[in-house]
Amino acid sequence: MRAPSSLTAGLLPKRNLNLQANSAVGVCIFGGNCEEKSAADEKLGVLLLNTGGPETLNDVQPFLYNLFSDPDVIRLPRLFKFLQRPLAKLVSILLAPRTKKRYAAIGGGSPLRRLTDEQVKSLDKLEWFTFFSGEQLCFVRVFSLEWNHIFCFSLLVMCVYRLENFFAADALRMALEGKNLLADVYVGMRYWYPFVEEAVEQIKRDGITKLVVLPLFPQFSISTTGSSIRVFRQIFEGDAYLSRLPVSVILSWYQRQGYIRSMADLIEIELAKFAKPEEVMIFFSAHGVPISYVEDAGDPYKDQMEECVYLIMQELKARGNGNDHTLAYQSRVGPLQWLKPYTAEVLVELGRKGVKSLLAVPISFVSEHIETLEEIDIGYKDLALGSGIENWRRVPALGCTPSFIRDLADAVIEALPYAKAQQTWRVTTEESDCP
Ligand SMILES: C=CC1=C(C)c2cc3[nH]c(cc4nc(cc5[nH]c(cc1n2)c(C)c5CCC(=O)O)C(CCC(=O)O)=C4C)c(C)c3C=C
Ligand SMILES: [Fe+2]
């Protein structure tokens, strides 16, 4: 079911590594017996983790099989572990037809791989000669072989787009130049190509000497970041090269100011599009997990989600927005109780109570995917409009928003000093459930 695929590696020109130790929340370190390298010998890698998604309708059932084979997604008692794969086969076959229809409704596959690659490119380009075009970050690699072509092209584009944006981005370039950071950026998906295993193989081939792992989930859940890190750790165990590699894992980053501000920016932009922005209910919709994850397994996901919403609302209040808000959980699968309240139920209730304007904010994701494009934009929108809500909008996922990408780069830099040689995993966060 798995086959190799190419990895996206990128480059940030490095002059030296002049990094300051910062306090980091949610950083977890492991590695072993590694001698200190001089800055010149250092080859930094950044591994972005995500779930991945089926790229075609034929991929749907094997993708679901990979997903439900994950013991962090279907958590069976130890005695019944032998049933994991047969159960995954059965559930994936049963769910595939309905899931295919949903992916068909968003173009026949998940956009997640393409969008994550775009985020990699944005990260890659942070030290490049940058300027904005509309909402996208454009870039020109200075002193590259293609200099002449790209320079001429960039001049043309710069004439077409607003010059003040160029200067704003140039300020970003200069700010980043001070950080002097070079890194190869890799993508490792948990359930589809390019798999985490492939990314780690590429990291080995490239001779990376220090690695920062950045899951593209702001909040930690056993079912997302926890699962990917468990696989990642299994790959490292027993591998001579990898066990010597200093690694720093960013377990969660929902508290980062750059992220909170970027979310508040997106919310403000959408609020302004309503006729009466002050009357809009801000509706945070988070991906759910079974309640047992939180209550029995100690998943910090719910607490982090609530804190995340609180921080965004504080930021909005500080900017003068006094909107009401609510948090609900979407995407429930199967017969178990999941985190409540459920998004669908709250939408109906709000309509019944007379709420007329609603702004949906997907809060667990940083890229558009099936749960934003299909579940929210089609399913929940129809439900809301049918329940009496008259004005509906949705905040887009952060994607390649420049302030967000810059903050991710800062998160990597802040995590670097924690990538020290360790014999075993060591957790430097309030979370004790680092796998
Ligand atoms: C914070 C994000 C996510 C959590 C938490 C999460 C938990 C979780 N998911 C399932 C079941 C499915 N997940 C599916 C796809 C999928 N899930 C996430 C994110 C979280 N999942 C992403 C980013 C994706 C990929 C989306 C894409 O565009 O391809 C799917 C298949 C698609 C669907 O039917 O929605 C299933 C099924 C469980 C059981 C679970 C917690 C235990
Ligand atoms: Fe999921």
Image: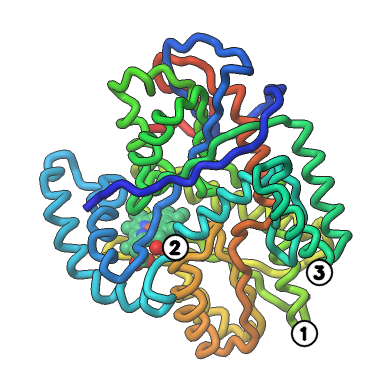
- Specify the label residue 160 is tagged with: 3
Q: Quadrant of ligand 2?
A: bottom left
Q: Amino acid at mark 1?
A: Ala
For the point 80% across and 59% down, which residue is it?
Answer: 155
- Specify the label residue 340 is tagged with: 2
* Helix, strand or loop under label 2: loop
Question: How far apart are labels 3 and 2 at the CA level?
Answer: 49 Å
Task: Please tell me which residue lies in front, 198 or 409.
Answer: 198
Q: Which residue is mark 1?
A: 275
Which numbered disc, 2 or 1, marks the residue that appears first in the sequence?
1
* Helix, strand or loop under label 3: helix
For the residues labelled 3 and 1, say whether their Cβ atoms are less than 8 Å apart: no
For the residues labelled 2 and 1, say whether their Cβ atoms are less than 8 Å apart: no
The location of residue 273, given as percent across then percent down, is 74, 79
Question: How far apart are labels 2 and 1 at the CA level?
Answer: 31 Å
Question: How far apart are labels 3 and 1 at the CA level?
Answer: 32 Å
Q: Amino acid at mark 3?
A: Val
The location of residue 90, given as percent across then percent down, is 14, 62
Which numbered disc, 3 or 2, marks the residue that appears first in the sequence?
3
- Specify the label residue 26 is tagged with: none
Assess mark 2: CB under 8 A from ligand 1? no
Task: Please tell me which residue lies in front, 172 or 69.
Answer: 172
For the point 33% across and 18% down, which residue is it?
Answer: 240
